Image: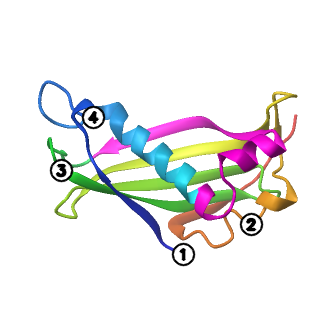
Amino acid sequence: MSFKVTFHTKWSDFDPNRHMRHTAYNDYAAEVRVRYFRDQNFSIEEFTRHNIGPILFTEETSFRKEIHLGENITVDLKLSGLSKNGERWKITHQVFNEAGQLSAVIKVYGAWIDLTKRKLTTPPEEAKHLFDIAEKSDAFEEIVLTRN
């Protein structure tokens, strides 16, 4: 399933050069992840109920084309990696400007954390479906877990 969200950018997203701040791209990608989880019936309230949360190990952003003040943007979500037990995942976001040109690519590598134990955890049964219908990127890979 393809998942993307169009946003109306706001004044605070831009820097003195009148183009989008580098961190604003990542803020929009994070919003898309939260909306994706919500649309899969696992909202922030469900995270709280199960005492888990998503964490990021890495976040890499490649900038391709400027986004200017007042432009709308569209951000998508593709699954680019998943461990067999669902504990760890990789997501790739593409950010498109109003003309539909690729403006940035954001790759995140994350996992689920138990908020009490402060340790990585597998998702509860109610969350195991989260990535089942996500569109996979061309570079999708199984994340192989190694334990020390």
Judged by depth in the image, the label closer to the viewer, 1 or 3, is 3
Front in this rendered view, residue 80 or 126: 126
Give the percent coordinates (x, y) of residue 64: 24, 48
Are dots 3 and 2 in contact, CB under 8 Å?
A: no
Are dots 4 and 3 in contact, CB under 8 Å?
A: no
Secondary element at image label 3: loop
Sequence-wise, the earlier of marks 4 and 2 is 4
Sequence-wise, the earlier of marks 4 and 1 is 1
Q: Quadrant of residue 54?
A: top right
Residue range (magenta): 37-63
Mark seen at residue 1:
1
In magenta stretch: residue 39: yes
**Image quarter in which the N terminus is found:** bottom right
* Residue at the spot of label 3: 71
Mark 1 packing: few (<14 Cα in 10 Å), some, or many (20+)?
few
> Mark 4 is on which residue type?
Asp
Secondary element at image label 1: loop
Looking at the image, residue 101 sits to the left or right of residue 1; the answer is left
**Cα separation between marks 1 and 3:** 26 Å
* Residue at the spot of label 4: 13
**Cα separation between marks 3 and 2:** 34 Å
> Mark 1 is on which residue type?
Met
Sequence-wise, the earlier of marks 1 and 3 is 1
Residue at (49%, 44%) from the top-left corner?
30
Mark seen at residue 62:
none
Mark seen at residue 129:
2
For residue 84, say whether it is visible: no
Residue reaching furthest top?
16
Give the percent coordinates (x, y) of residue 25: 35, 41
Number of marks in the rendered image = 4
